[in-house]
């Protein structure tokens, strides 16, 4: 496929064949080599062929092959002409990241970090198969899906201030749980307040570098060695079921003929099925917000118990990595509402956007980019440039480069734990095999991903954090 | 006996399952899928769950059948270790699969390796002549 170099950090697939718009890839030479090895570019081209797509199909620096849309894909659609696609959001709806700050430094917790981690491992239900500690009725589950993190706060999990510092204030207003299938509800009931397995994790981290002091200050990050807590998880089986259900409903109604890939199944945004998907997806988004809200609450409880207090453990922010939303963007000189899909991408709004909490509105929103297990994670800030370059979006993480089976052949969980311990990182997991599958060597270099985000201007570096304790589901 | 294998795939899990009949390939696909989450060879078979799934074509049937395993795990903590009495038939405009799932309930002694989020159509292939072969990519 022809690839035109625009500058050092961006490449274009010019419009050809059935493409309605070009595709643009934000990547360095090095990242592009990785991206070219799988079907990412073909998938970006497929997205560019969809009805009603606006401006361009965008590919983030951490992109890799997905199903239908690539992971790290961003696309916006015209509300009248365009489509909404479950494959443009992904199966783990509102997989996302929440970051808590603390007033503790490494010195304060170094002696107690094993205990902290052990207690967190006890408090937060981890891997698959463990039912959450809260068994809900269907009615309550539907309330959770309607109100998201608001439900959690009303029920004693966390503080009102957390809501202000959550994307969408922790609640997608259009959520309608009555469109969830019985199966989605059944899968959600035992899983609320669970971390899940795979690449999901909870880390106790310390700030290791601050790149932008002024912005970091606004985010509550003041000094190297400051302790932070990062929670990475999503909507669990409920979200997966919503995606699977609507792929099936849309396929049964509209068929997949003419689509280059069955996972690109979609519905017109304004159709009843399109609307129902949006409302169900929003319900799953809310489930995930509530999930992270509850987990954050339990983490604070553990700090309170082990450290004597959890004062100052304010939320920095909570971001979605897999979501579709209605947002206003500048489309060919006109401000216009579009339906934006971010699949493995983070919203990266710059200063002034009304969607950003007032406390951050002068600097831009925090963008949280987790690394792979045991490696650095980053805090970036959204930019006004991103709104012009990538519909206000940037990367979401490291992105795999090696299959799980390859990782299993090469690594052993126990050895990874020992290596991490040598670096001063404690690890708890329910499965050694799970640890081996998530070996950091199986992932892209997250340092390179955030460097490109920064240089391309779609998300600027603010701070780097490194783990001292990792809980892997 | 194992008649499945895993192939290279960057992010997700891609496997092929084989059989002398289409039914056997479906059986093997179920075992391949659960091998991503638990060691089915060490799980008992005292629980039985009769299942019936439908699809308007063979691929949708396969997807719904494998999704059933994920659903039973999430909602009943059912760990599949065996698929018996499997039959696939065509009924007018759709396919119907019936089978008896056997397995055990999750206990804290069972190691769960990871999460399978969903079964995808991505690179899904079903060869419906000898040797029967199924290829699936699961989102993990």
Image (spheres, coloured by chain):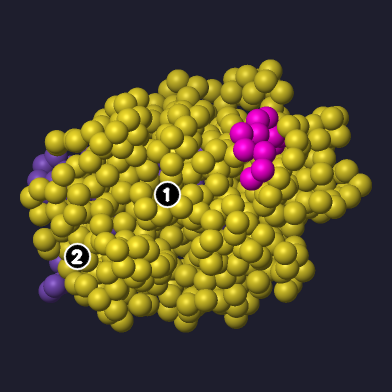
Q: Secondary structure at mark 1?
A: helix
Q: Residue at x 69, y 18 (%)?
A: A422
Relative to A188, is A182 on the left or the right?
A: left
Could you say which is closer to the camera, residue A151 or residue A15?
A15
| Number of the front mark, 1 or 2 | 1
First to last magenta residue range: A205-216
Q: CA distance from mark 1 to mark 2?
A: 26 Å
Other residues around mark 1 within 10 Å, as few (<14) / some (14–19) / many (≥20): some
- Residue B116 makes an appearance in the image: no
- Residue A259 makes an appearance in the image: yes
Q: Which chain is purple?
A: B
The percent coordinates of residue A83 (x first, y second) are 26, 68
Residue pushed farthest front? A333
The percent coordinates of residue A129 (x first, y second) are 58, 52
Q: With respect to residue A58, does A174 lie above or below?
A: below
Relative to A275, is A116 on the left or the right?
A: right
Q: With respect to residue B80, does A168 lie above or below?
A: below
Q: Check if residue A213 falls in the magenta segment.
A: yes
Q: With respect to residue A449, does B92 lie above or below?
A: below
The residue pinned by badge 1 equals: A385
Q: How many marks?
A: 2
Could you say which is closer to the camera, residue A403 or residue A16?
A16
Q: Colour of chain A?
A: yellow
Q: Residue at x 11, y 42 (%)?
A: B130
Q: Earlier in the sequence, mark 1 or mark 2?
A: 2
The residue pinned by badge 2 equals: A51
Q: Report which quarter residue A106 is drawn in.
A: top right
Could you say which is closer to the camera, residue B49 or residue A440?
A440
Other residues around mark 2 within 10 Å, as few (<14) / some (14–19) / many (≥20): some
Q: Quadrant of the N terminus of chain A?
A: top left
The percent coordinates of residue A318 (x first, y second) are 60, 55
Relative to A429, is B116 on the left or the right?
A: left
């Amino acid at each position: 496929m022809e690839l035109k170099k625009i500058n050092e950090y961006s490449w274009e697939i010019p419009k050809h064949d059935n493409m309605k718009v070009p595709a643009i890839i934000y990547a360095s030479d090095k990242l592009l080599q990785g991206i070219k090895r799988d079907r990412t570019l073909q998938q970006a081209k497929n997205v560019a062929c969809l009805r009603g797509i606006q401006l361009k199909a965008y590919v983030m620096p951490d992109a890799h092959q997905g199903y239908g849309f690539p992971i790290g894909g961003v696309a916006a659609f015209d509300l009248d002409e365009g489509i909404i696609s479950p494959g443009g959001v992904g199966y783990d709806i509102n997989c996302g990241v929440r970051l808590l700050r603390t007033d503790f430094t490494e010195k304060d917790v170094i002696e107690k970090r094993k205990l902290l981690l052990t207690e967190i491992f006890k408090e937060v239900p981890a891997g698959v198969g463990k039912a959450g500690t809260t068994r809900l009725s269907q009615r309550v589950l539907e309330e959770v899906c309607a109100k998201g993190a608001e439900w959690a706060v009303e029920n004693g999990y966390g503080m009102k201030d957390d809501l202000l510092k959550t994307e969408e204030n922790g609640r997608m207003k259009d959520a309608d749980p009555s469109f969830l299938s019985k199966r989605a509800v059944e899968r959600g009931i035992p899983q609320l307040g669970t971390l899940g397995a795979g690449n999901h994790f909870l880390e106790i981290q310390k700030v290791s570098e601050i790149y932008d002091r002024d912005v970091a200050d606004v985010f509550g990050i003041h000094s190297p060695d400051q302790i932070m807590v990062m929670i990475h998880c999503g909507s669990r089986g409920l979200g997966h079921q919503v995606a699977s259900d609507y792929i099936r409903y849309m396929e049964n109604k509209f068929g997949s003929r003419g689509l280059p890939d069955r996972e690109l199944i979609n519905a017109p945004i304004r159709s009843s099925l399109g609307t129902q998907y949006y409302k169900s997806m929003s319900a799953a988004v809310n489930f995930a917000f509530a999930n992270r809200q509850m987990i954050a609450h339990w983490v604070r409880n553990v700090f309170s118990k082990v450290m004597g207090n959890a004062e100052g453990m304010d939320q920095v922010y909570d971001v979605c990595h897999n979501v579709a939303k209605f947002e206003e963007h500048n489309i060919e000189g006109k401000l216009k509402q579009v339906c934006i899909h971010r699949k493995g991408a983070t919203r990266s709004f710059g200063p002034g956007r009304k969607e950003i909490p007032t406390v951050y509105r002068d600097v831009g929103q925090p963008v949280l980019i987790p690394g792979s297990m045991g490696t650095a994670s980053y805090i970036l800030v959204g930019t006004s440039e991103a709104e012009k370059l990538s519909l206000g979006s940037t990367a979401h993480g490291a992105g795999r480069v090696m299959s799980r089976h390859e990782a299993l052949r090469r690594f052993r969980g126990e050895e990874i734990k020992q290596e991490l311990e040598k670096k001063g990182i404690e690890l708890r997991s329910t499965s050694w095999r799970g640890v081996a599958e998530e070996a950091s060597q199986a992932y892209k270099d997250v340092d390179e991903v955030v460097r490109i985000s920064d240089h391309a201007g779609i998300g600027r570096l603010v701070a780097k954090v490194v783990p001292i304790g990792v809980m892997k589901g | 006996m194992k008649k499945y294998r895993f192939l290279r795939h960057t992010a997700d899990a891609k496997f092929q399952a084989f059989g002398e009949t289409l039914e056997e390939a479906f059986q093997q696909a179920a075992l391949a899928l659960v091998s991503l989450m638990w060691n089915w060879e060490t799980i008992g078979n005292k629980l039985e769950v009769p299942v019936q799934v439908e699809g308007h074509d063979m691929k949708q049937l396969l997807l719904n059948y494998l999704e059933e395993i994920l659903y039973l795990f999430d909602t009943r903590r059912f760990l599949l270790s065996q698929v018996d009495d499997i039959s696939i038939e065509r009924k007018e405009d759709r396919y119907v699969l019936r089978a008896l799932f056997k397995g055990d309930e999750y206990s804290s002694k069972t190691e769960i390796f990871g999460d399978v989020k969903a079964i995808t159509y991505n690179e899904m292939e079903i060869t419906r002549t000898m040797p029967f072969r199924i290829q699936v990519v699961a989102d993990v």
